[in-house]
Image (cartoon, rainbow, N blue to C red):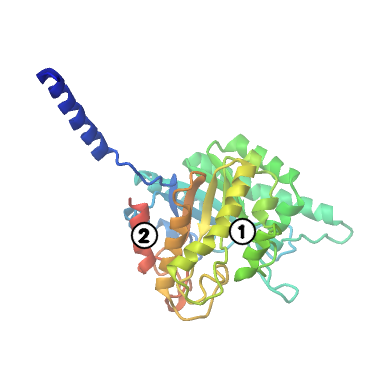
Amino acid sequence: MIGARDSLIAFWWVRLAMVILLLHPAHTLAAPQFRGVCYVTWGTPNVLLTKESDDQIRRLHALGVNCIAFRVTWLQESFDSVDLHPGFATPSDDSVRHVVHLCHSLGMKAMVALLVDFADHTKGGSYRWRGQIAPAAAEGGGADEAWKQWFDSYEKFALHYAKLCEESGADVFSFGAEMTNATTQFDQPWRELIRKVRDIYRGTLTYQANWSPLQYAFGGGGAASLVKQNQWNAEYKTVKFWDALDCAALSSYFSLTDKRNPGLEELAANWQVWLEDLRAWQREIKKPVLFSEVGYQSADRGAIEPWRTPLSTLPNPDLQARCYEAFLKTFYEESWVKGICWWMACPPKEWGVDKHGGGYPFLGKPAEEVVRRWFGK
């Protein structure tokens, strides 16, 4: 027979168990450490010092965004140049410091990410992008000498911002992005650069590899079929220096469909091929993965060729929202995902980034509510 004392003890144990269940539900969403947005400008060097830009970052913070991935671009004249230099709209060093300090004042993390672009994308008669950099030898010099000059110039670029990141307290430094031709050919020069950056910068260090092989020739279902055949030789798989970094970053514009306006179920289902491929890659490199750039235009065909801009198709903000939802449903609870940074937001009135409402920006569109619902949990 249970006595009154035993009954009282059992009663309080039950009450305690109920309190624990209320405070700690059986399933809690495991959010990535960095829930970010890529914040970019092609305007003027000091637009990021304005109140309007500050208010835009505060708006992102209110959505639950806890990391601003801030882009800094230097130029080389064309794909075969050996020298890099700031462009007319490269953010000033004061702008970098200001954005980092603003993020910290709001309780957010700040990531500084370096990009290289070309002043002339069409030298030689065809469009080229940073993944096709191929320095040309000066008269009397060879290709090895041209690459050495290019790496010397790139080192000055990277070390300048490594020092700035250390001084300002930036939480993450991505010293490069989408340099496919340079990373597939070389390993040791990158390791030397990483060593020199480490001597200066003590925060989280990464590099942003591209999702695709050198050429963007894999829209629709073609890319997924190459993955299934183990023939998807993308940059993120060919980088050899992941072991020297704190995490691997990825520019993610995988094609998900052949349809102009697919539904959510199809988008989520078609992520599975890429999910398995990325899981296997992550197990191989043994590093957490930061999706440091992932985005969709709010236009028809936005899930066929997420990388192609502009799409020149009808605006479709609902498709953009479905693409955001499908990505988050697929990756948000993967334990190896260190973070997700949406491409993109920018200071108000940034010219040309959202022509006819069919571009990458998500603020003011249905995708904004998707971000709020997931990041704000």
Of residues 246 and 158, which is closer to you in this image?
246
Question: Can the viewer see residue 151 in this picture?
Answer: yes
The residue carrying mark 1 is: 211
Q: Position of residue 119 (x, y in %)?
A: 64, 67
* Left or right: residue 286 compared with residue 317: right
Of residues 211 and 11, which is closer to you in this image?
11
**Outermost residue toward the left in this view:** 4
Cα distance in 3D space between marks 2 and 1: 29 Å
Crowd tier of the residue under label 2, counting other residues whose Cα lies within 10 Å: few below 14, some 14–19, many 20 or above: some
Query: In the displayed structure, would residue 214 be above or below residue 353?
Result: above
The residue carrying mark 2 is: 56
Q: Secondary structure at mark 2?
A: helix
* Left or right: residue 375 compared with residue 73: left
The residue sitting at 41% across, 47% down in the picture is 31
Q: Which of marks 1 and 2 precedes in the sequence?
A: 2
What amino acid is labelled 2 in the image?
Answer: Gln
What amino acid is labelled 1 in the image?
Answer: Trp
Crowd tier of the residue under label 1, counting other residues whose Cα lies within 10 Å: few below 14, some 14–19, many 20 or above: many
The residue sitting at 59% across, 37% down in the picture is 200
Q: Position of residue 345 (x, y in %)?
A: 43, 62
Of residues 111 and 269, which is closer to you in this image?
269
Q: Position of residue 161 (x, y in %)?
A: 57, 47
* Left or right: residue 173 compared with residue 17: right
Q: Secondary structure at mark 1?
A: loop
**Outermost residue toward the right in this view:** 140
Query: In the displayed structure, would residue 122 be above or below residue 275?
Result: below
> In which quarter of the view is residue 133 placed?
bottom right
